Image (cartoon, rainbow, N blue to C red):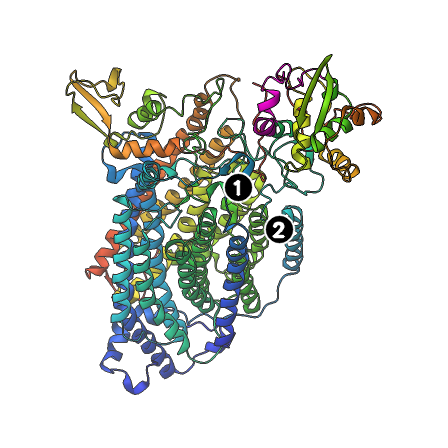
Amino acid sequence: MKSTPLLFAGLFASFAVAWCAVIAIPQMQIGNLQPQVDEENADVYPVDISGLSEQGRQVYVAQGCGACHTQLIRDAHMGPDIQREWGARRTVARDYIYDTPVTLGSMRNGPDLSNVGAAKSEDSTRRYINDPRWLYLELYSPRSHEADSIMPPYRYLFKKRKISGEPSPEALPLTGANAVRSGYEVVPTAKARALVAFLLSLDKSHPLKEARATAPAAK
Amino acid sequence: MSAISTELPQNVLENAEAVRLEHIERVTIDRSARAPVLFFYASAVFWLLVQNALGLIASIKIQWPEFLSACPVLTYGRVVAAHGNIAVYGWASMAGLGTALWILARLCRVALPRPALPIIGGAVWNLGVVAGTLGILFGNGRVLPFLEFPKSAMLVLFLGYCLIAVWGIVIFLQRRPGEVFISTLYLVAALLWFPWLLAGSNTLLGWHGVHGVMQAVVGAWYAQNLLGVWLTALGLGTIYYFIPKVSGKPVYSASLAGLGFWAFIILSGWTGMQRLSGGPVPAWLVTVSISATIMLLIPVVIVMVNYLLTLRESFSLLNHSPTLRFAFFGALSYFVANVVFLIGSFRSVGAVTQFTWFGVAEDQLFINAFFSMAMFGAMYYIIPRLVVAEWLSGNLIRIHYWGAAYGFGMSIVMLLAAGVAQGSAQSVIRIGEGANPQADFMLSVSAMLPLLIGRVMAQVLLCIGNLVFAIHFALLLLRLGRPSADEPTLFGAKS
Amino acid sequence: MQPEAEDIDYRETAAVTEVHRAVQREHPEPGAGELEAPAWLIVLTMVLIGCAAFYLGAFSGGFSGNVFNERVGFIGADQAAGTGAASAPAAPETLAQLGKKVFAQNCVTCHQATGLGVPGSFPPLVQSDWVLGSPKRVSMIVLKGLQGPVHVKGQVFNGAMPAWGVNLTDKKIAAVLSYVRSEWGNKAGEITPDQVAAVRKAVAAHAEPWTEADLLAVPVEAAASPAAATSGTAVPAKK
């Protein structure tokens, strides 16, 4: 190979063609998706979150939760995500159009979180999860829910303080090894509140044309 | 030991004067490269130790979640992100750049012009890594694998990189006329591909941002190109240099090598989307990457054929030469890395191995078993020529080799096993309906934990080996090596 | 810069032989031979390209941006397996589910949520022969409206039902009809949008709302439409 311009051109062409094929073309296909709108029912999905939930997304990213938790549901033939009630259907591109940054995650050391905030039916095996009190306790002490949990405790997202007057309604119900001294309570900081608000906003189960609901009907 | 080999017709040097001038030329090149390359290597070894420490902390946290959990700076998510990024940008890239500059200078037979400027570039690059690491640890990290550094840190890296790589290109452009050796092609390709990759991805994430799932698409493409083109091209170029150099035999086939190079360059950019298999991206995107990965076996096999057949009469050298042994380990690992990556890409396998430690093992096969070992081999060859002294002790090299080989090897095997165990447990629901779903999920956690203890042990071995290497290297920098002699420091007495 | 012989510091030369032993004992910079590719490598290349091409053909889902499941279009895969594969954009809900929404938005004011209507004012839909009987007649009612006295379950109602064909699509009309024919204990088959479209076309020329006599003049067609679902629409669950 003697010709320098040919080498440079060949390298650049290979790069550019690959870039066009796997970046530019998908960008044209799924880069500018709009929410699905159903005029008859004034139903728009997805909607952008804002305020406390959006701040919570930043807390989620800053704590690196994606190192152990994913936020995507696969088809039934790829795995029992749906059977596990992590979601009513697989997730598709339109589910994430307002997610900045998009927190798909890459490891499942812990369960998937795509639909933590989705409404659960009475007999859902996951009906405990969209309760903020459960989520606060999970963040403070995961082992109080699951003795062998490998999730680290996020105590620094909470503060212990003296009870002034009435105990706070947000105070965590700590017992056993986690119990605090009488007269003290543990309450969530703003970061914890934001994070829980974010988790409760996670709902990717709304039906979409490109992804039919496949939740098992029989209970 | 004879310094001249008569195997290469184009280099038959009967004239003693010509020989002497060639030696002087090499010395001049080495002297011009000394300061920048040693600076890069010193930075790389520093980051290697930091990366080892962070990796060990992360592994301990998996077994013992309360370990250092009170400190938000060291929370698991941040430590893991910092570990991965330092491994690639701190250790691997610095070692790769140092090696690339030296090999290019030697092959093009051009001394490094203005050595001060690559050093400035290296300092800026290190600044970027520091800024990125602190960004992650203090909560400003981002989310995509190998892109967790804040975007400002990536910009600093880019600027530092340009100051370094431009000299590699300048050397190439000023090369002596003649056939371009295969290593030169790979190294130049790497030097050009990386800034395009950095720019072509980071602008789409940080400045002219894409929305939604496209961020993950860009991220997956970037991560795979980072490992599969940037590090791979540097590593392949390095091994292509050292196998014939140490053995004294020519590369088996130049035309095969060229074919393999172009196939690699054309196909590698299309891979990466299998990281999003099953995910919220159009199916064709994942399929295209899997097809490209199937075809990528062609250049992989070509490269292995060249490596093995070049060494066909010299396997006994592996007993003695540290450089050759490390480089050969890297070469074999390259093959294994690609085969494992291909197997894991298929959807039927990915359904089980996705989102598990298997993916971590796949990355480590590229970064550690292949690239890092190749870099160690290069460093064992190059550093004595820069400091003009030999390694102090063959035993210290031996400790490093076994620490690294067992450390990387066992770590990867344990991760593969843990990934398969975790994935198999997660791919079926074992407990009865109505029972606690957490209990079923915990089956996958309890399946993987014992195997991950094996990984912790492997990492301890690795830390020991790398620490020994770092000390050995520091001794050389402090002029405490063996004086340059007729024999290099080898594993054992040469027969 | 290539070192010329004159540029070299010759005091170095003694040092070269004394100190730079490493450089002296090196092999020359590597070169490459020209041995040919083994035949098996060429065969392997062909095989790999073939595999890659097959995989690409089988799992690309038409290179569409809407196909997320690679098994769509896969040779031999069972597309109706109900695994969530979306070949063409299917309705997100059944006809009856849509019908429930249409009913709630348009019909409930008069016919009530119970389907029992208001005695003396608005006829009931529950167990009504008009609802359960001929699909064509009930489609005509919704499309063009009804005026004058009409007998429903032995009672007479003399109101005016507006023509919904102006505001509602065939699909919505089919949906609401399917809904009322399967709700409140009613058990009659679905009406498809195509059936409504056919009726709409047939009566396009007629401008006025129907009278009871007009409707009774329409012959009742043969056995009610089968209850078996076509692909994409499940039989609605009973309450």
Q: Which residue is mark 2?
A: C63
Chain containing mark 1 = A
Q: Quadrant of the C terminus of chain B?
A: bottom left
Element type at mark 2: helix
The image position of residue C179, as x and y in percent, is 65, 24
**Residue B86 coordinates in the image, percent (x, y):** 32, 50
Disc 1 is placed on an element classified as strand
Answer whether residue C81 is visible to the viewer in this image: no
Report x, y in % for residue C187.
Answer: 71, 18
Same chain for mark 2 and mark 1? The answer is no
- Tell me if residue B184 is in the magenta stretch: no
Q: Can you tell which mark lies on residue C185?
A: none
C18 and B429: which one is in front?
B429
State which region is magenta: C100-128
The answer, for residue A78, to whether it is visible in the render is yes
Amino acid type, label 2:
Phe
Question: Could you tell me how many numbered marks the image carries?
Answer: 2
For label 1, the crowd category at 10 Å Cα-Cα, with few meaning under 14, some 14 to 19 and many 20 or more, is some
Q: In the picture shown, does residue A98 fall above or below A3?
A: above
Q: Nearer the viewer, residue B106 or B266?
A: B266
Residue B119 sits above or below residue B455 on the image: below
Q: In which image quadrant can residue A209 be found?
A: top right
Q: Is residue C110 magenta?
A: yes
Indicate which label's residue lies in the foreground, 2 or 1. 1
Q: Give residue C222's quadrant in the image.
A: top right
Q: Mark 2 to mark 1: distance in Å?
A: 22 Å
Type of amino acid under label 1:
Gln
- Residue C189 picture location, percent across and down: 73, 23
Query: Who's the residue at 45% across and 23% down the image?
Result: A126
Disc 1 marks which residue?
A: A36
In the picture, the quarter occupied by the N terminus of chain B is bottom left
Left or right position of B131 against C50: left
